[in-house]
Structure formats: structure tokens, C-alpha cells
Image (cartoon, rainbow, N blue to C red):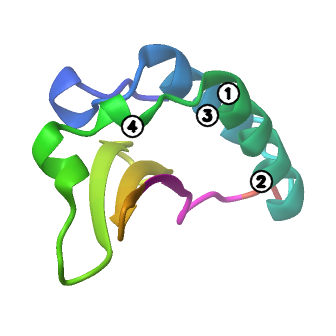
Amino acid sequence: MTQASAARTRCPAGLVTAIRRATACHADWPQTAVLVADQLRLHLPGPEMLTADEREGSPDGYVCHTLHAEPDGAFSVCGTRLGSSVRRTYDLPVLTPAR
């Protein structure tokens, strides 16, 4: 799999590598979600992944900041802000299980 350039990621290398390994298993959708969730629990960064300005959020509501996007679109990692809490969300839009 193609490695992301430094300009495309703000995530720790260990987190990106762990998600790549989990998605490379080519399991079905539910099992892939479990594999990725297991890796997120082990490698999850804290709110410091967002800049101070990003942690401020918006009075208009939900804000999402892309922290990593795979060049091939296989997955992305986003940090979100809603109200007074920072949330870490993980978008996996293009996982394709093996046929």
C-alpha cells in the first residue's frame, strides 16, 4: 500500500500503520470495523492532535478536521469538535472486503 506523505497526515505513524494493517486483512465490513476499533483503542491520540484554534470549535456547531487521508481514499482519520467536547472520529468510507 502507498505510504502517506508527511503533508497528508497529522496522525502518529503507529496509528496509521495499525489501521492500514487492519484494513489490509480484507475481512468483511463488520470484522474490519472490529479490527480497526481494536487498533484505535491501542493507538488513539488525545485532543492534542488538534491545534489550539481547532480545539476552540465553532459556535455554529459541529466541526471536523481531517488529520489523515490515505492517498487512495481507503480511510481517513478526523478529529471533531461539538460543543465543549473534543471527539475523535474515524471515517472509513472506501474499505473493500476481499471477494
Please name the residue that numbered disc 4 is placed on: 47
Secondary element at tag 1: helix
Q: Are marks 1 and 3 in contact (CB under 8 Å)?
A: yes
Amino acid type indicated by mark 4: Pro
Circle 2 packing at 10 Å, graded few (<14), some (14-19), many (20+), is some
Direction top: furthest residue: 14
Label 2 belongs to which residue?
Answer: 33
Residue at 67%, 59% in the rendered image: 96
Which is closer to the viewer, label 4 or label 2? 4
Q: Secondary structure at mark 2?
A: helix
Q: CA distance from mark 4 to mark 2?
A: 22 Å
C-alpha separation, residue under disc 1 versus residue under disc 3: 5 Å
Residue in view at x 39 percent, y 37 percent: 47
* Stretch of the chain drawn in magenta: 86-96
Can residue 56 be seen? yes
Q: CA distance from mark 4 to mark 1?
A: 24 Å
**Mark nearer the N terminus (4 vs 1):** 1
Kind of residue at disc 2: Ala
Number of the label disc, if any, that sits on residue 36: none
Residue located farthest toward the left when viewing the structure as drawn: 53
Numbered disc in front, either 1 or 3: 3
- Horizontal side, residue 74 vs residue 95: left or right: left
Residue 21: quarter of image:
top right
Q: Residue at x 66, y 35 (%)?
A: 40
Mark number displayed over residue 21: 1
- State the residue lying farthest toward the front: 84
Label 3: which residue? Answer: 19
Image height of 97 relative to 63, above or below: above
Q: Nearer the viewer, mark 4 or mark 3?
A: 4
State the image quarter where residue 64 is shown.
bottom left
Where is residue 48 drawn, in percent x and y?
Answer: 33, 30
